[in-house]
Amino acid sequence: MEIEYFKKLSKRQSLYNKYDCPMKKYIPSGCTLTQIEALQERCRIRLPKAYKEYLFLIGENHRLYDSGIGFCYDEIEDIQEEALSLVKEEGYVIKDDFWVIDILYNDHFHFFYLKDGDNPSIYHWIGSDEKYFDGYENGLRFVDKYFNVYIEKMIPSKLEKFIESLINLM
C-alpha cells in the first residue's frame, strides 16, 4: 500500500520492525490488505484512505492512546454496534453514516463521517448526563480536522520512549 497520510508513522514502524526482542508483542502491528478489503465488504462501506493506511500500519493490534486504551482489529465491528446502541439509548441522532475508531468506558467514542473524504475530521460523542474530566458535557463535539493529525497526536511520547529503551537494551 502506498502511504500518503502516515509517512511518519510508516518510518516509525520500519524502525520498530528492525529489532527483534522479547517485548516485540507490544509493538503495534498492521492489518493485511485482505483484512481491510474484507472489513469493507462485510460492512458494505468504503473506508477513507487515511484510515486504511492506519489499519495497514498499526490496525491489527496496538496500545497507542495516552489513556491506555488499546485497539484490536477483531473488535472493529463490535465497537460500531456498541456505539450505535449507545446513541440510540441516549435518544441522540447522528444523521450521517459514521465510523467509530474507539469507544471508551461504554459511554463515549471518537468517530468520523464516511462522507468526509480520504482524511476525515474526527468527532467525539459523549453519552450520559455527566461532565467528564475535560469539562465537556454530553453530546457531540469536533476534535480534529484530519484523521492522520488526530492519530499522530494520540501516539504518546511514552510509547516512543519505551521503544527507544528496548532498542538501547539490545
Image (cartoon, rainbow, N blue to C red):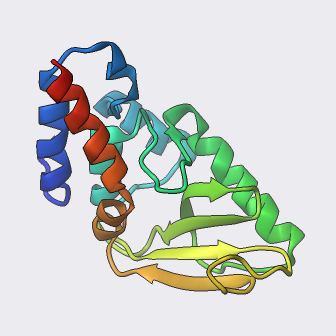
User: Image point 73% across, 61% down: which residue?
Assistant: 84
Q: Provide residue 138's location: percent of width, then percent of height.
A: 75, 83
- Can you see residue 56? no
Q: In which quadrant will I find the N terminus?
A: top left
Q: Provide residue 21's location: percent of width, then percent of height.
A: 26, 15
User: Image point 19% across, 60% down: which residue?
Assistant: 5
- Can you see residue 122? yes
Q: Provide residue 93's location: percent of width, then percent of height.
A: 74, 80
Q: Is residue 89 left or right of residue 141?
A: right
User: Image point 80% across, 63% down: which residue?
Assistant: 86
Q: Is residue 133 left or right of residue 143?
A: right
- Of residues 9 and 59, the one drawn nearer to the viewer in this rendering: 9
User: Image point 58% across, 85% down: which residue?
Assistant: 141
Q: How many marks?
A: 0
Residue 89, quarter of picture? bottom right
Q: Provide residue 15's location: percent of width, then percent of height.
A: 12, 34
Residue 121, quarter of picture? bottom left
